[in-house]
Image (cartoon, helix red, strand yellow):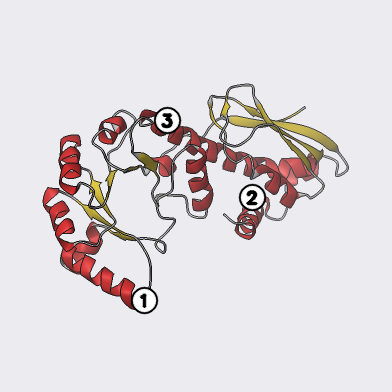
Amino acid sequence: MIDNELNAFILRALEEDTGDGDHTSLASIPASATGMARLIIKEKGIIAGIRIAPVIFRLTDPSLSTDMLIEDGRHVSPGDIAFTVEGKVQSILRAERIVLNIMQRMSGIATSTAQYVEKVKDTKARITDTRKTTPGMRALEKEAVRIGGGINHRMGLYDMIMLKDNHTDYAGSISEAIARTKEYLSKNRLNLKIEVESRNLKEVNEILDAGGVDRIMLDNFSVPMTAEAVKIIGDRCETESSGGITLENVRDYALCGVDFISIGALTHHIKSLDMSLKAF
């Protein structure tokens, strides 16, 4: 997420949370009161969102001062202090929930991603995310995947062709969908990679017969079917396993020789990392 987009996102989040005022803080804390707070880690994991926190505090109140003590991607444990912030108490309290919401979610994603990456570290398979992200937070969630050691799949509908089952069914066949795609890319002078989803070995062969594809997704294949598909495809294009991948079976799929393993759960089914912002 570039600076302008990040700033706009944070300002929307602050507006959503503050409305016409943080009346709790306005009522109980003098406007002149100053203080310090620190972000305390409460469980083991991978920290993410460190670079975002100072931006939130700055946009909330430019006079707030932050001291970042841990870098993104570091392993953290209960009791670790990620950063301190100092300044007007009302401003610290206004920013508190936005900081925690973003950092807890990003850290949960980074932590989960790192667990998958660890499982396949001695194979050629790369762990990648999907488009199953929170609306408005895609760039931050995909950043968290990278912090956890994974890589990003396409960012959206615009930076890669991905012919899924609905596309090929509506088009009439896989071969017809691929032919139309090639014509479209040529006509519009677009240089986009083409990935096609397959549901069985028959479709794998149909994709290979059509040719001109950069990657084949093996969707919800069993481990034995995946191994067979990888053997059939060889080095003609990249391979990607997707669907039904868990920490328990991800290594089995990786050992089949696939190039990528995409996991939607990295961003849509995560447990936030526990942390809290406390005065001191």
Q: Residue at x 72, y 47 (%)?
A: 22
Judge by depth and name the residue closer to the eye, 232 or 32.
Answer: 232
Q: Residue at x 55, y 24 (%)?
A: 43
Q: Which is more N-terminal, label 2 or label 1?
A: 2
Considering the image in quadrants, where does the N terminus appear? bottom right
Dots 2 and 3: beta carbons under 8 Å? Answer: no
Q: Which residue is mark 2?
A: 17
Q: Which is more N-terminal, label 3 or label 1?
A: 3
Q: Is residue 241 left or right of residue 200?
A: right
- For label 3, the crowd category at 10 Å Cα-Cα, with few meaning under 14, some 14 to 19 and many 20 or more, is some
Judge by depth and name the residue closer to the eye, 259 or 17.
Answer: 259
Q: Work out how far the residue at label 1 is from the one at label 2, CA to CA, in angstroms.
A: 43 Å
Q: From the viewer's perspective, is residue 111 above or below residue 190?
A: above
In front: mark 2 or mark 3? Answer: 3
Report the residue that reaches farthest toward the front: 235
Of helix, strand and loop, which one carries label 3?
helix
Q: Which residue is mark 3?
A: 115
| Amino acid type, label 3 | Gln
Q: Which is more N-terminal, label 3 or label 2?
A: 2
Q: Which mark is residue 14?
A: none
| Amino acid type, label 1 | Asn
- For label 1, the crowd category at 10 Å Cα-Cα, with few meaning under 14, some 14 to 19 and many 20 or more, is few
User: Residue 227 appears at what percent x and percent y?
Assistant: 18, 38
Q: Residue at x 85, y 38 (%)?
A: 34
Of helix, strand and loop, which one carries label 2?
helix
Q: Which residue is mark 1?
A: 188
Dots 1 and 2: beta carbons under 8 Å? Answer: no
